[in-house]
Image (spheres, helix red, strand yellow):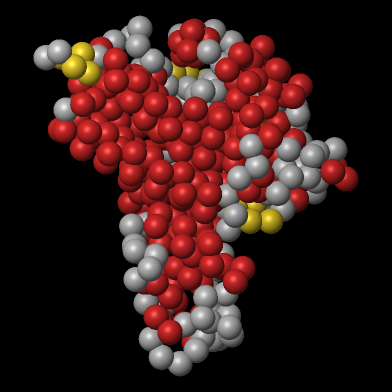
Amino acid sequence: MDTLLGDAAERLFAQTCTPALLRGIEQGQPAAAAWQACEDAGFADALVPEAQGGAGLDLPDALPVMLAAGRHLCPYPIAHTMLARAWLAGAGRARPAGSIAIAPHGLSIQGRRVMGANVPWVRVADNVLAHINGQAWLLATQAGQVEPNGVHGSLDGEASWALADAQCLGSGSPLDELAAAAYAGLMAGAMDRVLSLTLDYANTRAQFGKPIGRFQAMQQQISVMAEQVWAVRMAAQLAFQGAGGRPQPMLAAMGKARASLAAPVVADIAHAVHGAIGVTAEYDLQLYTRRLREWRLAGGSESYWHERIGAHALASGADALTYLRAVSSTGTILPGRPHGLPPSTAVPGSCRDAELPSRGGKAAHVAASAVGLDPQA
């Protein structure tokens, strides 16, 4: 993975997205200055084609920025904004100024108002790109009424807009795979930081004359956490496959499902290792674990995406490994061929005898590992 862009994002976010700033923004301070630094650095338009004023990066190239944003808990929706601006550019729509949150679920039109009970990032975002009744809508947060959702420190909130202030963009591709990919990247970065915090604490906190990290019970738990963290990292790499700034739907689904599945395990082990200090307001761990539990549900929990993946797999008629190979190499199941596979993989005999396409070999290996299958099986 190219780290040049990721290193630049790491430096910027380390300077402008400090834990102290995050605590202030959770309490209602504005995020405008931190967002402007990110905007000035050009990250927001990284996936927009060069002909339309962006950097024209491919989707995998943007993943290091998402990981860095999660690692520093950027208090604005940079991951959503990058994907939303690419989506708007692809749809031939003007890109609004400022940050954009993606809301694929939860908004509805009631009378002459657009209503949302738990709109993602709405307390800090400048705009919301929402999917309502099969159509995409662009909503400026300044034109709406925004209220906290009652969850401690959440940047989501209740919001409503007059229908006259909402811009209908017409029908288009669903937004849920964009949100799924964004959250998969953010969660992978956040979990990486939680693992780092936990390792540091286990190696410095002494009990019975030695660091607690030397006790076998601690080592076993931290090993489980590390396994989960790296599985999510691979799942995020899957989610960030696609062209034109748009993730491949089933890969995004797998990425978000795996990240959501790991979130409570990673958070629980981190707090078990830290003990009481992990939940104190002064310690950074609780900033990350609160956000992980929120992001687990945002854009669809693991149950939501597992149902989507399961229905798609059953409709394909393929066995599990053949299905993974097809999805990871093409992003979809092709109709009209045995098991829906491209000709190079649809060969007689069992799936063990199938030829793995060269362009999908690495992705298939990652896909199998990310969802818990032995890639050599």
Which one is nearer the viewer's eye here, 237 or 121?
Answer: 237
Furthest toward the left, the residue is: 208
Q: Residue furthest front?
A: 209
Tell me the residue at 29%/10% (across/down). 280
Nearest the eye: 166 or 364: 364
Residue at left offset 55%, top offset 29%: 69
Image-based side of 110 in relation to 38, left or right: left
Return the residue nearer the eye: 247 or 188: 188
Query: Residue 19, percent across and down?
Result: 48, 13
Residue 348 visible in this rendered orientation of the protein: yes
Please tell me whether residue 360 is drawn above or below residue 79 in the rendered image: below
Seen in the picture, residue 349 relative to 88 is either above or below; the reply is below
**Quadrant location of the C terminus?**
bottom left
Image quadrant in which you'd find residue 249: bottom right
Quadrant containing the N terminus in the rendered view: top right
> Residue visible at 47% across and 58% down?
366
Q: Look at the picture and state if 225 lies above or below 304.
A: above
Q: At which x and y percent is residue 10? A: 60, 25
Q: Is residue 178 above or below residue 338?
A: above
Q: Position of residue 332 (x, y in %)?
A: 55, 68
Q: Is residue 363 left or right of residue 294?
A: right
Query: Residue 348 location, x and y as percent?
Result: 45, 92
Can the viewer see residue 141 in this picture? no
Instruction: From the viewer's perspective, tell me whether residue 96 is left or right of residue 184.
Output: right
Q: Quadrant of residue 310?
A: bottom left
